[in-house]
């Protein structure tokens, strides 16, 4: 019974049948909401003292040194600010690490390590400049930040492009992939730098290629701590793509004269056909004089046959030899 009575009264209040009561209830709720907003705004004008934790990040390091240990990577700053400043600015500001200038830090050496410290109490202005205006720093903990460094080692390493190339029909890479720069300087701890032989670019796939391109690719940093640094964060790759066609060239076969001193010879056939791929723009440059083919009589002795294989001695750099027809010849030595 009691429960039913309470529910009935609640229904009368939330859904009154009387129009005047409904109007009075609406006015009451509006006034209550307005009062709560005014109270909150008044409270936001008050000043508060709040302790906030900030991450600390070294903005620059002593020349030739690398930071290997930062025991105090978090500091607590007690600030005084109005409620408006705190909620509108400080909450966002605390998500960013505070930068500390260490370039001119005094260091003392012990074995292979260098030690330094920074008094936070003497650097209020450094931290204050990174906080929102209207915020006053009252105290910083800890009073001293300690840092350990080691000597930085540098090394020149090659860059390897991690690219996959897929060409349209009859198109191919005209030359090798060009990289600029093809080597970069890396810096870090000696035991880390010594293990690195090359640096790879980001992985990239190019499909249906029928024209050249120039593109920048980011370099992938190996995951080490402390991290290594690069002299360049990216490289430029250049691809030259051309349409290729098949060409056939007749070239005379030469015997290896060093092994036939004092003798003359004759091959059968005297000429063979080289089948190669050549870029359309280079087709008119082809000439038999650009190729040399050799047959080695010593290879025939191993099989006791008079037929010996033909191999390519020289060929122009702009062609890709596919095969030789026929790839074996007979020969006759004339004393």
Image (cartoon, grey):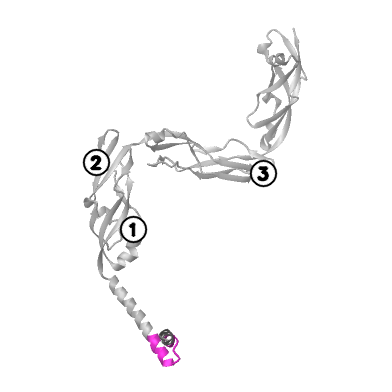
- What span is in magenta? 11-27
The residue tagged with tag 1: helix, strand or loop? loop
Q: Is residue 331 above or below residue 47?
A: above
- How packed is label 3: few (under 14 Cα within 10 Å), some, or many (20 or more)? few
User: To which residue does mark 2 refer?
Assistant: 106
* Residue beneath the point at 25% across and 35% down: 109
Q: Is residue 15 magenta?
A: yes
Q: Nearer the viewer, residue 192 or 100?
A: 192
CB-based contact (under 8 Å), mark 2 and mark 1: no
Q: Whole-percent x and y of residue 14? A: 43, 85
Alpha-carbon distance for marks 2 and 3?
A: 62 Å
Alpha-carbon distance for marks 1 and 3?
A: 53 Å
The residue tagged with tag 3: helix, strand or loop? loop
User: To which residue does mark 3 refer?
Assistant: 168
Circle nearer the N terminus (1, 3):
1
- Residue 146 visible in the current orientation: yes
Residue at the limit of the structure toward the right, as seen here: 268
- Residue 130 visible in the current orientation: no
- How packed is label 1: few (under 14 Cα within 10 Å), some, or many (20 or more)? some
Q: Whole-percent x and y of residue 128? A: 27, 56
Circle nearer the N terminus (2, 3):
2
Quarter of the picture holding the C terminus: top right
Q: Is residue 200 above or below residue 129?
A: above
User: To which residue does mark 1 refer?
Assistant: 94
CB-based contact (under 8 Å), mark 1 and mark 3: no
């Amino acid at each position: 019974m009691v429960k039913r009575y309470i529910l009935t009264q609640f229904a009368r209040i939330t859904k009154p049948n009387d129009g005047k009561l409904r109007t009075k209830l609406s006015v009451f709720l509006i006034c209550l909401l307005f009062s709560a907003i005014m109270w909150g705004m008044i409270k936001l004008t008050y000043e508060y003292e709040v302790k906030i934790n900030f991450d600390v990040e070294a903005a620059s390091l002593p020349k030739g040194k690398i930071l290997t240990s930062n025991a105090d990577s978090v500091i607590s700053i007690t600030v005084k600010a109005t409620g408006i400043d705190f909620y509108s600015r400080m909450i966002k500001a605390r998500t960013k690490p505070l930068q500390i200038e260490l370039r001119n830090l005094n260091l003392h050496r012990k074995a292979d390590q260098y030690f330094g410290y920074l008094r936070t109490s003497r650097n209020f202005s450094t931290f204050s400049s990174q906080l929102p205006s209207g915020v006053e720093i009252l105290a910083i903990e800890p009073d001293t930040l300690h840092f350990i460094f080691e000597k930085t080692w540098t090394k020149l390493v090659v860059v390897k492009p991690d690219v996959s190339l897929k060409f349209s029909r009859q198109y191919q890479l005209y030359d090798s992939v060009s990289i600029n720069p093809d080597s970069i300087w890396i810096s870090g701890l000696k035991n880390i730098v010594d293990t690195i032989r090359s640096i790879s670019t980001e992985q990239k796939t190019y499909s249906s290629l029928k024209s050249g391109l120039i593109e920048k690719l980011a370099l992938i940093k190996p995951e080490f701590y402390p991290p290594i640094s690069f002299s360049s964060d990216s490289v430029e790759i250049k691809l030259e793509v051309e349409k290729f066609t098949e060409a056939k060239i007749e070239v005379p076969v030469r015997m290896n004269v060093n092994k036939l001193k004092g003798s003359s010879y004759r091959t059968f056939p005297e000429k063979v056909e080289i089948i190669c791929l050549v870029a359309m723009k280079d087709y008119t440059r082809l000439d038999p004089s650009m190729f040399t083919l050799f047959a080695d009589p010593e290879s025939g002795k191993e099989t006791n046959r008079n037929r010996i294989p033909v191999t390519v001695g020289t060929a122009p750099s702009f062609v890709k030899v596919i095969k030789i027809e026929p790839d074996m010849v007979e020969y006759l030595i004339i004393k």
